[in-house]
Amino acid sequence: MSNRPKKWIIVEKAEASHYLFAASPLLSMTKDMESVGFSNIGFGVVEYIKEKASYIFPRKIWADAGDKYLKIILNDPKLIKKIFFISEKFSQKLFEYGRYLLSVNLKDKGNEELGSLYEKFEELHNQAHFRRTIFWVMETPKEIFSKYVINLLKEKIKQQKLKLQPEVVFAILATPLIKNHVAQEEQEFIKTVLKLKDLDNINDGILNKKLEKHYKKYCWLPYGMSGPAWDKRYFVKNAKKYLIKDKAEIIERLRFLENQVNHIKKQQEKFLKLLKLDKDIMELINIARKSIYIKSLSKEALFYGFYASENLIKEIGNRLGINVALVRRMLPWEIKTALKLSKVDAEELKQRYKYSVQYAYRGKTKVFIEKEAKNFIKSIDVEIEKGIDRKIIQLIGVCAQPGKAIGNVKIINNAKDLNKMKNGDILISKMTDPEIIAAMKKAGAVVTDMGGITCHAAIVSRELGIPCIIGTKYATKIFEDNNKVEVDADKGIIKKI
């Protein structure tokens, strides 16, 4: 470990993470990237503080890797397309395996069989996950790929003397024309509500019965990697809010969602007709579009997989005499052995939960706890974020979904913050994740500190047609709850009014 780099940066901070989600992909980044045609990162760290995590990498290695990955894609676009194909295949397999796990009677399985079931899930999870890191490296935090394509578009726009915002053009052209599960859920939910609107004497019993199918199909959407899923009460409560609205208003929302893909398609056709882009730029636009689709699909597959494996994790915990939170503090490859021996060090897992570090280096990994973990973080010289002038009233980020909005700020970083969100509020988050989807659906606009074109906020905002600005770096520090702000996503600007 003496050869490890000296200067490190926090690439991303997560409000929710655990070893079963991050450990294998982190290790794969240090040893398996070469197997898919990209250079290994070599070193990586995840610092865990209870449910939260920081992903930390060597500053120079991370920056160099982003530049290298871009050059590889420019030189051989077929390589990234092949990776997209494989990622899609493993994502579909993970959905299939999740459905299988939900059907299995785990009580009848022996410890060795439980270990094999988890091992299979872990393999699919990692295969669907680690290839996504190619765009993660390029897009976080400097949007290397996005900015490269945006600069090409800027030149085309300038040459043809068009009055277009290159960031907006890129955001539109890079939007997939395939709806993800988030968009499908709202559309199908509204259709169900419209049928209920025609019934007399609606009560909770009828709502529960009529929403059962929808609940089973979509309850996993906010699960992320550790839950919770939506319960029936969420859907019943949401249905009641719709049912008090005029039918015309509900139909208007449904038509908006149904027409969203056609609307984006027409915008894309308009821009392409105006710009007359050459083959090389179109290739990159298509790669951006596919990368967003694949990230959305693979993330949903991961979240469905973790939702579907919850009972498996609980059963493993029962056999080992520990709770779910502690099972999630095990390294994935520790589970099968622990089940075989019917033994686990619960005290160490408790410490891992409280504060710990996973260090991955060139295909090896080590976990530090207590003082060792603190000393390790001190030793790698992590770059400290500079102080912010709170008198700033305006920030600039990257347009992820064009549009404008005015509203009151709500800082939403986790499910605990959801209750303060009202329709039309401006949602500001460090970086959105599935557990705050319900708040995103209410938002007049979404603004994040972090993220690139393939981040969760960008994907969901495009699906829902909500103006979105990503990568402002400091929005959660500059703005406070109930500040009135104006969002101009076309220009990437949010400012206090």
Image (spheres, rainbow, N blue to C red):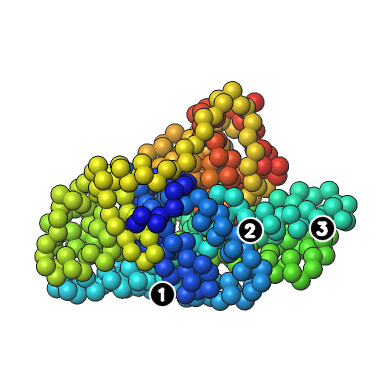
Look at the image and tell me whether residue 270 can be seen.
Answer: no
CB-based contact (under 8 Å), mark 1 and mark 2 = no
Task: Locate the N terminus and report the quarter of the image it occupies.
Answer: bottom left
Relative to 282, residue 189 above or below: above
- The numbered dot on residue 41 is none
The residue where tag 2 is placed is 145
- Disc 3 crowd rating (10 Å Cα; few below 14, some 14-19, many 20+) is some
Determine the residue positioned at 26% across, 72% down. 117
Q: Of the residues under marks 3 and 1, which one precedes in the sequence?
A: 1
Q: Amino acid at mark 2?
A: Phe
Determine the residue positioned at 55% across, 60% down. 65
Instruction: Tell me: 113 left or right of 439.
Output: left
- Disc 1 crowd rating (10 Å Cα; few below 14, some 14-19, many 20+) is some
Q: Secondary structure at mark 3?
A: helix
Determine the residue positioned at 41% across, 37% down. 417
On the image, which quarter does residue 265 sit in? bottom right
- Whole-angstrom CA distance, mark 3 to mark 1, is 41 Å
Determine the residue positioned at 38% across, 53% down. 45
Residue nearest the observer in this picture, 151 or 286: 151
Q: Amino acid at mark 3?
A: Lys
Q: Of the residues under marks 1 and 2, which one precedes in the sequence?
A: 1
Instruction: Tell me: 264 left or right of 126.
Output: right
Q: Secondary structure at mark 2?
A: helix
Where residue 485 appears, x then y in whole percent?
Answer: 61, 30
- Disc 2 crowd rating (10 Å Cα; few below 14, some 14-19, many 20+) is many
Of tags 3 and 1, which is closer to the observer?
3
Q: Amino acid at mark 1?
A: Lys
- The numbered dot on residue 156 is 3
- The numbered dot on residue 93 is 1
Residue nearest the observer in this picture, 135 or 91: 135
